[in-house]
Image: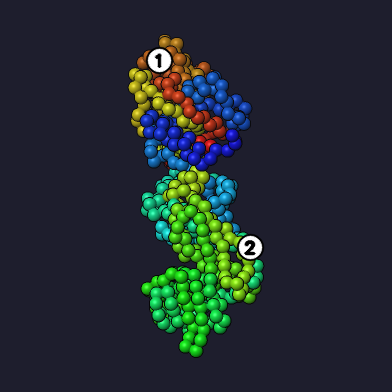
Amino acid sequence: MTNKLTTDGVNVILGAIEADYDDNNYYVFTSKYTPWANGDVAPATANASVLFSQQVRNELMVLKKILPSGVKRMCRRINWNPQVVYDEYDDEVDLSGLNYYVVTQSRNVYKCLDNGDGNPSTVPPNMTTNATFQTADGYKWKYMFSISEDAMSVHATSNTIPVETSIPVSESAVSGAIDRIRVTGSANGWPSQESTTVVEALANNFFRVNRFDHMEANFYSDSSLYVTGGGGAGFVAKISQSAANASGYYITTTTGNNLVTVGSTVLISPYVDIGGNGAGAKAYATVNNSSGVINKVVIVNPGSGYTWANASITCNALHQSVATLKAVTGPKGGHGYDPYTELGADTVKFSVRVDPDEGLAVPYRVTGIMKNPQNYDQTDVTTNIALAYNQAFISLLPGITTPPSAGEVITGLTSGATATIISANTSSIYFADVTGTFVQDENILGATSSSVATLTAINNSDVNTDTGQIMFVNQMTAIQRQINSSEIVYVELKL
């Protein structure tokens, strides 16, 4: 067994988490309104003790339900920036630490299939077509999906972005396509590439062209004919025969195309032979005419069904040379079919937005996820927002000018009940961590302030803080809530 989960393993585990979420009520909570013991500095490591867990429950404040829109699979955030060399997709390497995809300022996500032979990217990808496309800097990109503005603002961080699935992209993905053939080595003996024009189509595979650079019989046999423009543009075939005589220059190809006609422009270059267990892939090669080195292999048709492939370049015996190629096959289902797997989405993020009117504007120091909290009547908490603290209206006794202070313990002078003050003013108190039961119209005494007040009305929370499963706890330096702005509270579970 290795110590690294496969992408399928991550998908199974995260899928189980998401499925469990669908059948249960999950809440992000805030807790701990009292300071940390050491000068209110968050402990360096999480506390997993029973006592700490109970303290988290005692100081629960806000529970915000995690809605379906608040659950996202996340992947690393790799921003597109100019003058950066991005990694290209490769079917033979572990991509998890490579920068092989980008997110642009337009919130579009693209996978890099070709990085222009390792050159810096200077032109941002911007097309949202289902097909692959090339930018002016030589990079070849595959559009994956777009992130909505709301999802970006709620879920994205400096390190991660939410992963979406584009239905059109997924449905148009081609399983086992070959979108890249890399030249890994080339000798310098290859014949120059030539451009010519069809002046007569004598048959769908027999053409008279306007010129040759070489007059030898069959000099161009076993080379490639690629129609670069005009009728039949995009057609590529192997040349079986070539001839030059007083009546013209002639080319015969092994396959035909009825659209090639007068005016069609043609590139003649070494032939790219693609093998493997798929079908339909076609490409042509370009040559650096100064050095005689194979420059690049250009994909004309990526084909389909390849789980393995190989490629080679040939010419006839008049001018044999050597080059090595690497055919890169696409992922299962094709590029864009399963963005979670393709981009290595190894994190589930649970996010909620807490608005200013949802809870008290007091600091909290703990967040987490709670599953299936209940009310005191043993019914499930199902509301979008639940407040776990209590409120009481008070009347200060004559001669008392200040209410109990935050963090101090109050005691009911009739009931003997105790609680900790979260926040207070001269007309009301908010409290939690209750022992016993306060009664209306009894007086309360602050343990440190000696403030005395009468409880004129009591509004107890329905949430039973001793229920529910705490699935995750995060402790931090105090977060001060603001009365004029919302907050995004989130928990990321990373595998």
Q: Give the tally of numbered discs.
A: 2
* SS class, disc 1: loop
Residue 393, percent from left and from top: 38, 23
Closest to the camera, between mark 2 and mark 1, is 2
**Residue 438: which disc?**
1
| In-front residue for pair 42/35 | 42
Residue at left offset 43%, top offset 27%: 371
- The Cα atoms of the two marked residues, 2 and 1, are separated by 83 Å
The residue singled out by tag 2 in the image is 185
In the foreground, 20 or 235: 235
95 versus 494 height, above or below = below
- Asked whether residue 83 is in view, the answer is no
Q: Position of residue 313 (x, y in %)?
A: 57, 65
Q: Amino acid at mark 2?
A: Gly
- What secondary structure is found at the residue carrying circle 2? strand
Rendered residue at 44%/49% (across/down): 333
* Image vertical order of residue 201 relative to residue 169, above or below: below
Q: Residue at x 35, y 30 (%)?
A: 383
Q: Amino acid at mark 1?
A: Phe
Residue 171 x, y percent position in the rendering:
38, 52
The disc, 2 or 1, on the residue closer to the chain's N-terminal end is: 2
**On the rendered structure, is 439 left or right of 221?**
left
**Callouts 2 and 1 close, C-beta under 8 Å:** no
Q: Residues within 10 Å of mark 2 (few under 14, many from 20)?
A: few
Quadrant of the drawing holding the N terminus:
top right
Please provide percent x and percent y for residue 486: 43, 40
Disc number for residue 381:
none
